[in-house]
Amino acid sequence: MPLFIDFVTLKIVIFYLLDTDLLLDHVFDSVGFNKIEDVVFRQLVKARLFYPASKAATVEYLKNHFDEDLTKSGA
């Protein structure tokens, strides 16, 4: 069975993800969080805004999308 790829939909999804990432970067910087020079903190804030979930789910999201292996603490 041939694989069918809808390139229009793919472009829309990629644009949405990139646009959302740029928007979250702008919000992060505009509230002054960029003064904290920690890449993991930036990823954590963006993950919680883009994918609000439990601490355990956020840790899993960071592992899957940013290749960050964090342990959950303070549960």
Image (tube, rainbow, N blue to C red):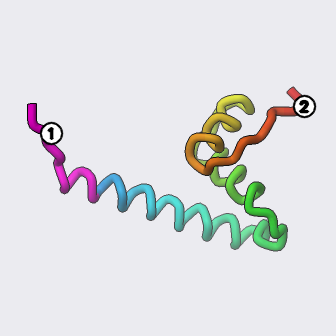
The 10 Å Cα crowd at callout 2, few under 14, some 14 to 19, many 20 or more, is few
Quadrant where the C terminus is found in the figure: top right
Q: What residue appears at the point 36 percent right and 61 percent down from the top-left corner?
A: 15
Question: Which numbered dot is residue 3?
Answer: 1
Q: CA distance from mark 2 to mark 1?
A: 45 Å
From the viewer's perspective, tell me whether residue 63 is left or right of residue 55.
left
Q: In the rendered image, which quarter is residue 48 located in?
A: top right
How many numbered badges does the structure rendering display?
2
The relative height of residue 10 versus residue 60 in the rendered view (above or below) is below
* x then y, percent, for residue 65: 56, 46
Q: What residue appears at the point 71 percent right and 29 percent down from the top-left corner?
A: 56
Residue type at tag 1: Leu
Question: Which numbered dot is residue 57?
Answer: none
* x then y, percent, for residue 32: 78, 71
From the viewer's perspective, tell me whether residue 11 is left or right of residue 46.
left
- Of badges 2 and 1, the one in the foreground is 1
Q: Front-most of 58 and 24?
A: 58
Q: What residue appears at the point 63 percent right and 38 percent down from the top-left corner?
A: 52
Highlighted magenta segment, given as a residue range: 1-11
* x then y, percent, for residue 39: 74, 62
Residue farthest to the left?
Answer: 1
Question: Which numbered dot is residue 74?
Answer: 2
The relative height of residue 73 versus residue 9 in the rendered view (above or below) is above
Q: What residue appears at the point 81 percent right and 69 percent down from the top-left corner?
A: 37
Tell which circle, 2 or 1, labels the residue nearer the N-terminal end. Answer: 1
Q: Secondary structure at mark 2?
A: loop
Is residue 43 one of those drawn in magenta? no
* x then y, percent, for residue 11: 27, 59
